[in-house]
Amino acid sequence: MEDDKYILIDLEQTLGTGEVHFWNQNRFGYTKIPGVAGKFEVKEAATIVSNDLDNNTVAVPVKQFNTILEKYGEVMN
C-alpha cells in the first residue's frame, strides 16, 4: 500500500538550489518532480536516513506528503 511508504528529501540539494530534491527509486539520483519520486518501505527509508552521516536526508510519509500536495493540486501516484 502506497500510504505505508515514505518519500525521501535531500536537504543539501534542496537548500542549495531552492527546489525540493526527492530521491529516485532504487537510490538512483534525484528528481524535482514529486509524482516520480521514489517511494520506500519504512525499513529501507530508515536505513537510508540513519546512514546519511551529514543528516541531510529526511523521510516523509507519502500519506502526509499527499495532504500537502493536495493543497497545491497534485498527488503522488
Image (spheres, grey):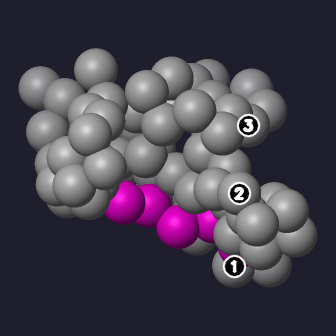
**Location of residue 19 in the rendering, given as x and y in whole percent from the top left corner:** 71, 57
Q: Nearer the viewer, mark 1 or mark 2?
A: 2
The nearer-to-camera label among 3 and 2 is 2
Q: Residue 12: tell me if it is visible.
A: no
User: Residue 67 sits in which quadrant?
Assistant: bottom left
Main SS of the magenta segment? strand
**Tag 3's secondary structure?**
strand
At 61% from the left edge and 45% from the top edge, which residue is drawn? 22
Cα separation between marks 3 and 1 = 17 Å
Helix, strand or loop at label 2? It is loop
Secondary structure under the numbered disc 1 in the rendered image: loop
Counting other residues with Cα less than 10 Å from the Cα at mark 2, is it few (<14), some (14-19), or many (20 or more)? few
The quadrant of the image that shows the C terminus is top left
Please name the residue that numbered disc 3 is placed on. Answer: 30
Separation of residues labelled 1 and 2 (CA atoms): 18 Å
Q: Which residue is mark 1?
A: 55
Give amino acid for label 3.
Answer: Tyr
Circle nearer the N terminus (3, 2): 2
Magenta extent: 56-61
Q: Is residue 59 left or right of residue 69?
A: right
In the rendered image, residue 7, in percent from the top left (x then y), is placed at 43, 46
User: Residue at the spot x=14%, y=39% of the render?
Assistant: 3
Q: Is residue 8 above or below residue 75?
A: below
**Residue 41 found in image quarter:** top left
* Residue 12 lies in quadrant: bottom right
Could you tell me the amino acid type at mark 1? Asn
Task: Examine the structure image and report whether residue 60 is included in the region drawn in magenta.
Answer: yes
Name which residue type carries label 2.
Glu
Q: Which residue sits at x=36%, y=60%?
A: 60
Residue 17 picture location, percent across and down: 85, 62
Provide the residue designation for mark 2.
19
